[in-house]
Amino acid sequence: MAHKGKVNSVSGRKIRVDQIEPHLPYGIVGADVESENVNLQEGDEIEFKYNREKRRIFNVKILNREDAGPSQMMAKVEPIEYCAYIANVIEERGIDAIGANGQNWLHKNMAFAVHHAYAYKPDDVRDEWQKWILSSSTRSGIQEHRNSLGGENAGLYKAVARPEFHLDLLPKPSFAISFRFILAKPYISRDEESIYVIYNPVVKDSVFGLPMIRETAWKGHLRQTMREIQNRFPENGGKVTDETIIDRLFGPRDVDDLKDAMQGYLRFYPTFFDDVSLEVINPHSREKRAGDNPILIESVPAGRKGDFFLLYTPIVGLAPITENLSEDDKQKWQECNDAIMKAAMVDLQELVRAIQAMFLKYGFSAKATDGYGRAQNELEQVDSILMLQTNCRGIAPGFNWDDDCRFQTFDAFAQGVREMT
């Protein structure tokens, strides 16, 4: 396979080649080459082949100079790994060598992280990164990046960030909840990035690069909130006594026999944001009663908006009662359907009560007990989508599903559901 690259510099027998496409093995994009017979100049565009086992470049062709003869680069090759390559670029040209507009804010953020890992004075790099991440140009760059998500990623982003429920294809009674909330307190979480400027980056989506709340995080926080509001923590050792509703919605937590394992009725979706900021925590020493080692934590700042989506689908839906059934069978099926409908009405009411408590009281963020991860008591529609949809309006007879499913606050949402059920 032929590779292409550009000669960055020539110094005696040492040549640096970068911008290698396709990348060499392990994502290598640059290489230092030492050769005794060199016919290359800085800026030459070359094509070559690479022997992975012998680590040799051969069959080099100069593409931009017709008068140049073949260059015999047959000596050893020292590949530059991606991180070291980026660090070298920054060291030579400065941090501004990496763009910071639109999607490129991600590249510059990564460049800071790599430079911090390789820098002689990492604290200086961290200070510069802190100024950059808080600048208005960077924060607007993140918003531009979200707005520019299109092209080949448009369908994927829309499918993840704006789910379509297709309730008419699901078992009855299914329902979906969707609304836009506003952060009253910053949201913080812990990403799994192995290289970063600070130890506490906010979780970001690996495909789109946007700050996010994972669907698993929503599930965990909502389950914990539901246990709290249903008083499932009595004083006798804190053992939960009854989790019938919780197990039905989220799935049983501890199962001794796999036959008893069951998937819950709820489906969660991620939430994306378009801004980042920094929080400073300064733990105090017990001896000095003062803090001298402030900790930076990346966050989504208060005031930013996010979209929440939730789908409820029972494992066993309503059964059709046809005329060819016997009277006994009709009665049995009707009793079963009544039980399913009653459970759905209870689940809807408990869910909305838990959602209200999670957003306003208990939180949905790391360090929630310290006040992080709370929402304002305000709600907005997501792209004119009704906040509550269902494929079986019998769970709330007489309720105007078309006009009444627009709520201004979490309190109004909870009150409306209580009245409809």
Image (cartoon, rainbow, N blue to C red):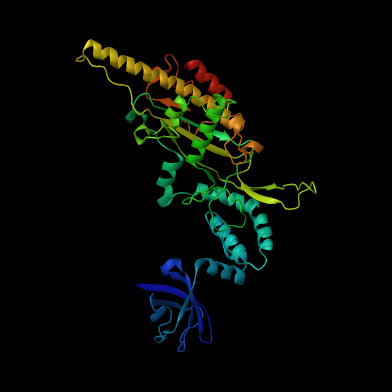
- Position of residue 317 measured from the top left corner of the image (x, y, whole percent): 33, 25
Going by the image, does 155 lie left or right of 383?
A: left
- Position of residue 345 measured from the top left corner of the image (x, y, whole percent): 44, 20
Q: Quadrant of residue 400?
A: top left
Q: Is residue 209 above or below residue 321?
A: below
Is 334 or 270 nearer to us in this picture?
334
Is 83 or 397 nearer to us in this picture?
83
Furthest residue in direction right, as rendered = 288
Q: Is residue 249 at all visible to an observer of this figure?
A: yes
Furthest residue in direction bottom, as rendered = 37
Furthest residue in direction front, as rendered = 236
Residue at 41% across / 69% down in the picture?
A: 25
- Position of residue 331 measured from the top left corner of the image (x, y, whole percent): 28, 12
> Where the N terminus falls, by quadrant?
bottom left
Going by the image, does 81 lie left or right of 125?
A: left
Q: Is residue 133 above or below residue 344?
A: below
Q: Is residue 21 above or below residue 421?
A: below
Furthest residue in direction left, as rendered = 324
- Position of residue 129 measured from the top left corner of the image (x, y, whole percent): 64, 57
